[in-house]
Image (spheres, rainbow, N blue to C red):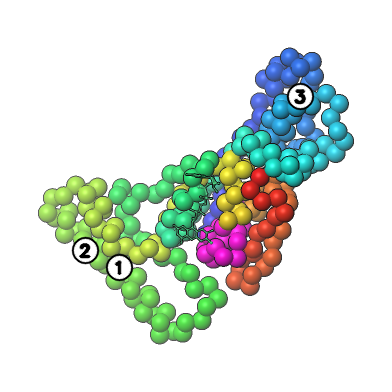
Amino acid sequence: MEVYLIAKSQPIYHTISQWLSKHHVDYKPTTTHSTEAIAEYAGRVCYDSFANPRPGGTQAYLQNILKQGHGSVLEHCVYTFAFVGLSRVCTHELVRHRAGFSYSQRSQRYCDEGCMNVVDPLQGIEIGDKLREEIRECIDKSRELYDKICSLLEREGYQRKVVRSVARYFLPQGISTEIVVTANARSWRHFLETRGSRHADREIRLLANKVLDKLLEDSPNLFGDYKREPLGDGTCEITTEWEKV
Ligand SMILES: Cc1cc2nc3c(=O)[nH]c(=O)nc-3n(C[C@H](O)[C@H](O)[C@H](O)COP(=O)(O)OP(=O)(O)OC[C@H]3O[C@@H](n4cnc5c(N)ncnc54)[C@H](O)[C@@H]3O)c2cc1C
């Protein structure tokens, strides 16, 4: 599974200066992380606290926002990810997250799945060579069946879109897919907490850990409160004292 942070919110400092001139200040957050700066600007407008800010800079300011649960401030920071090589099982769980999320997923109606890969959920689970071979054969059979249905319906003169729409019903749930997901920092936090739980499925917990890696690189003051505890399956449980801000 690969996780790419492909876009994020950026402040436009020259228009921010124009805006803040109305407040007779020219405030610049101490953070070098642009996404965090947006959250700080949004938070400071609530209490008109641009002049004479408390010590501690962005780090102390955003920590207090998280502690107070002033979550709407985080909604102004938006991150777009491309997830590659995760299963449709996993994306089916992912798309259950509604508030603040947008999705664009590889279409099985338009794209050919003849060369499909299946995500292996058996990481670290010993099942023996015989069962492994049976699984391999079953996946090969699924590919053959898919190609057979496509060829037959194409020969019958059905449109390519119709052909793939029908053939996809017989693909395995574990088929590898690709999805672009956009959400704001508040929504990503909720995702990390629910899917980083030890009770969540391993694959989506792995995804949550990889997302957290990227978010920590980009915005340590918005996600730095998370603690991780290894669960012995290649993933960590993700917890925080400031849940659901
Ligand atoms: C361990 C685990 C097991 C699960 N098992 C199942 C299962 O067996 N079957 C199943 O169907 N799902 C299951 N789910 C999915 C779960 O029910 C949620 O759909 C999913 O986690 C998305 O969470 P959410 O609704 O809080 O997120 P979002 O949709 O992103 O919503 C975020 C928050 O916004 C608020 N909100 C959003 N929509 C509404 C609304 N319509 N009304 C009121 N408030 C709203 C809520 O406070 C919500 O927590 C499971 C999830 C986990 C983590």
Q: Which residue is mark 2?
A: 148
Q: Are marks 3 and 2 in contact (CB under 8 Å)?
A: no
Q: Which quadrant: the C terminus?
A: top right
Mark before the other along the chain sequence, 3 or 2: 3
* Image spot of residue 110 (x, y percent): 31, 47
Instruction: Examine the residues drawn in magenta and state their main secondary structure.
Output: helix
Mark before the other along the chain sequence, 1 or 3: 3
Q: Secondary structure under badge 3?
A: loop
Residue 225 on the magenta span:
no
* Image spot of residue 201 (x, y percent): 52, 64
Q: Which residue is mark 3?
A: 48
Q: Nearer the viewer, residue 187 or 89?
A: 187
Q: Nearer the viewer, residue 108 or 55?
A: 55
Mark before the other along the chain sequence, 2 or 1: 1
**Residue 202 seen in this snapshot:** yes
Q: Secondary structure under badge 1?
A: helix
* Image spot of residue 163 (x, y percent): 22, 53
Amino acid under label 2? Answer: Lys
The segment highlighted magenta reads: 195-211
Amino acid under label 3? Answer: Asp
Q: Are marks 1 and 3 in contact (CB under 8 Å)?
A: no
Amino acid under label 1? Answer: Ser
